[in-house]
């Protein structure tokens, strides 16, 4: 057998694949660059249990059809970026923005501890323990944030942590656009 086919061809294929992977890594694409097929579409139907004994217990699709644009934050207590972005949602709540939360693949006990320690920005809170809603929403990881208009239609998806810059340049303008689109 020819030595090239034995050693050279596999090495050449490996080098080509390595170059392709390196090019993709350096492209700078982020999870937030992935478009969501849900933008412009109604939220998928869901009904989630909430933290027992908490006001605003549970969350469902109907909670997004009250005529006012809403922010939906997908988070988890084990998510470090979620802790970093948490004060931003407390600030939004202070501004009168309705912020609903979905606890993603986590436990009620962890959520209680997290919210007790950091504060509770959520008007409504649902627990997606198995990640089913996350799958329906196309969540690629936590945190992810959505802007939902007052009719339950997804207007924006932001993958990754939210900071003051994202609030000013993305979330607040999407809320204003959603508000303007309502009758």
Image (cartoon, rainbow, N blue to C red):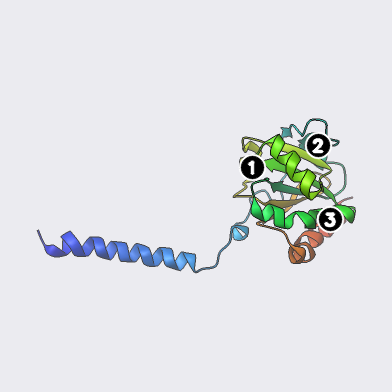
* 131 to 82, vertically: above or below: above
Q: Quadrant of residue 160?
A: bottom right
Q: Is residue 117 above or below residue 172?
A: above
Q: Nearer the viewer, mark 1 or mark 2?
A: 1
Work out whether mark 3 precedes mark 1 in sequence or the reverse, and give the earlier one.
Answer: 3
Which mark is drawn over residue 62? 2
**Quarter of the figure that contains the N terminus:** bottom left
Distance from Cα at disc 3 to Cα at disc 2: 21 Å
Closest to the camera, between mark 3 and mark 1, is: 3
Distance, label 1 to label 2, CA atoms, is: 17 Å
Return the residue at label 3: 92
> Residue 119 location in percent, x, y?
81, 48
For the point 35% across and 62% down, the residue is 17
Mark number, residue 134: 1
Q: Are marks 3 and 2 in contact (CB under 8 Å)?
A: no
x and y percentages locating residue 8 in the rendered image? 20, 65
Task: Give left or right: position of 163 versus 105.
Answer: right
Give the SS element for disc 2. Answer: helix
Q: CA distance from mark 3 to mark 1?
A: 23 Å
Image coordinates of residue 64 in percent, x first then y, are 81, 42
Asked if one can make out residue 44 in the rendered structure from this viewpoint, the answer is no
């Amino acid at each position: 057998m020819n030595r090239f086919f034995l050693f050279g061809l596999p090495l050449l294929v490996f080098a080509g694949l390595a170059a392709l992977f390196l090019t993709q890594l350096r492209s700078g694409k982020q999870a937030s660059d992935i478009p969501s097929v849900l933008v412009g579409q109604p939220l998928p139907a869901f009904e989630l249990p909430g933290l027992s004994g908490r006001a605003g217990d549970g969350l469902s699709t109907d909670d997004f059809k009250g005529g006012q644009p809403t922010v939906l934050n997908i988070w988890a207590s084990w998510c470090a970026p979620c802790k970093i972005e948490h004060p931003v949602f407390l600030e939004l709540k202070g501004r009168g923005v309705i912020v609903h939360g979905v606890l993603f693949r986590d436990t009620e006990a962890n959520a209680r501890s997290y919210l007790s320690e950091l504060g509770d920005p959520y008007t409504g809170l649902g627990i997606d323990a198995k990640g089913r809603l996350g799958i329906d929403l196309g969540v690629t990881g936590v945190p992810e944030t959505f802007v939902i208009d007052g009719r339950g239609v997804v207007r924006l998806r932001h993958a990754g942590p939210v900071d003051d810059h994202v609030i000013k340049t993305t979330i607040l303008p999407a809320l204003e656009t959603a508000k303007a689109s309502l009758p």
